[in-house]
Structure formats: C-alpha cells, structure tokens
Amino acid sequence: MKELLLLLASIVLIASSGLAQESSQVHFARVYRPNEAPPPAGQNITYFGGPLMLGAKNTIYIVYYGNWKTSQKNIINGWAAHLNGTGLYNVNTTYHDGSNNFVNGKINFNCAKNTYTDLYSLGKSLNDANVQTIVANAISGGHLPNDTNGIYFLLTFSNVTESAFGGSFCTLFCGYHSPSNTIVSGETIKYSFVGDPNRCPSGCDGNVAVFGDTTTPNNSIDADGSINIMFHELSETVTDPEVNLGAGTTAWNSGSCGENGDCCNFTFGTTSIATNGSHFNQTFSNGKNYLIQEMFELTGTGFTRVPGKCVQTK
C-alpha cells in the first residue's frame, strides 16, 4: 500500500509540473540595483554554436494579460509597429551563426492580428507553467497564429504577480525569455514574460529607477516601462533563442556580461527631456519618444566581432 501511495504521489507531482521549465532554459532581465557597478569597458560576449533567429519573418505577438487600458496598448502596439528597420533593432544584425549568417533587420508586427487580451484566465498569481499555458491557450484557441518564427510576449498588468525559478517579478527579474517545446507539442516556441513595471517602478522602470522621474515619455509607466523590457528580451531572443534547451543550443551568451541585453541593462546613454519632464533617448517615425536601453553591438567582422560596446542608435 505504501508503495502504491508513493507511486500515486509521483504521478500527481509529474502531472502538476505541467509546462514547467528548468531554470537553465530561462534568461532573466534582472531588476535595477543602484549599488551595482556599471557595465565594465571592453565587455565581450561568446558564441557557443547554437541557432539564431535569422529569418525575415520574425514576428512579435503580444498577450495582454489583465485589465490593460486601450491607451496603454496603443503605446506598446505603436512602438512594435514602428520597430522594423530602426537603428535600435538593427544592432541585433551584428550577430551571426557559425556560417556567418546574420540576424535579419526585419521584425514584423500587426496589432490587429498579433495581439490578444486575456482577462485573468488563470488568476492574478502566476508561475512559469501558467505563463506557458496562457500562451498555449492563445494559440490553440485561434487567437494567435502558431509561429515558430514568432516571439510571444505575455504582458501582465500591475495587479498580477509571478513567481518562478526561485525568485519573483520585482525582486529577482523584470522579465525573461525562454524556449518551450510543450506550448505546441513537437515545436520550439519562443516566449517571454514581461511584468508591468508600474508594480515596482524603482526596480523595473528606467525613468523612475535611473533618473528619478515621476512619469515616462508617453505618460504611462505601465506601457513605456514594458517597452524597455520587451526590447531587452526581444534582442536576447533573436540572438540566443534556445538558451539551453538541449546540448549545443546556446548561441550568443556568457562572456563577461551574459546575453546582449544584459550587457547594457539599464544603460541609456545620452538622453533628452520630454515636455512632461521625463527622459527619453529614442524617437520613432510615429513621432513618439521612448526611453530604451542601449544594446550590445558586436564590432569588427566575421568571428572577430568581439569585444563590442553598448550603443544607442536611432
């Protein structure tokens, strides 16, 4: 009888793990630490032989989880819709695979087709298995396409918490990205959790944490702060999409700073002051201003494209 109970307990434990990931398959955007030293000069990043997202059809998908306002969604959607071809995103085109094939500068987004709102289907206290389930349900329910060239962002509203991998949103991380081969069985789906910085602006919003601003360029800590984290995770996903999903899958990682977004986390370069008194460093073709971290650009040619530097391009 004892053996039967142990067997049943094991079955329950396995079943309850659901879509859980190992922490080694996840890469965090860590919270702001004011006492940490700035990124050192002459940083480097190493290529480990894994795949990159090289195609011209890499696409952003967004699940708005919770009671996001239309005005907030419009800020985020506007940024994603105008990201393609910008100098900001093109920093990622300095990254290549082992055959010198480079990341394409195109990133696709259509706010009518590539977004979905989920009003707390799994409650307001999530873990990573829940995050994956929400993305899986958005795909299986026909709300978003099934796309192995996609990056699926789950953006949680400010009243949602998430605990995962021995830490939690606002204390350990502001967001993370990871591959999953269980969101859609037999496929590798790239997904990212991005928490609402308005839940902890001193840890996850650049304007508040770094500059002491009381607002952001578009008057929404929720939306503007999420954009900065999204760019961090998007850049890391296209240059290191599979992290440690299996042997030989890690691409650009480690070195002295981690993935390319980590090398410049909360580093913003030269800024200007918006009419509302907030700092910004990017102005897109839609006329909107944003405060977005610099990205680590590889220098040189071929396999001599290290060390690199944090750059701010427009």
Image: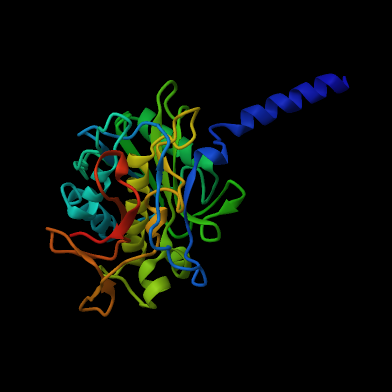
In front here: 177 or 91? 91
In the depicted structure, whether residue 290 falls above or below residue 148: below
Whether residue 129 is visible: no
In the depicted structure, whether residue 153 falls above or below residue 279: above
Pinpoint residue 192: horizontal percent, then vertical percent.
Answer: 41, 44
Q: Residue furthest right?
A: 1
Quarter the C terminus occupies: bottom left
In front here: 217 or 31? 31
Determine whether, in the image, residue 189 is placed left or right of residue 3: left
Pinpoint residue 48: horizontal percent, then vertical percent.
Answer: 43, 36
Pinpoint residue 125: horizontal percent, then vertical percent.
Answer: 55, 50
Pinpoint residue 116: horizontal percent, then vertical percent.
Answer: 32, 42
Residue at x 46%, y 70% (from the top left corner): 202
Q: Quadrant of residue 13?
A: top right
Quarter the N terminus occupies: top right
Residue at x 54%, y 39% (from the top left corner): 24
Residue at x 22%, y 76% (from the top left corner): 274
Specify how the rendered protein is coloured: rainbow
Query: Disc count in the image?
Result: 0
Determine whether, in the image, residue 254 is placed left or right of residue 61: right
Determine whether, in the image, residue 29 is placed left or right of residue 86: right
Whether residue 281 is visible: yes
In the depicted structure, whether residue 194 falls above or below residue 5: below
Residue at x 45%, y 37% (from the top left corner): 243
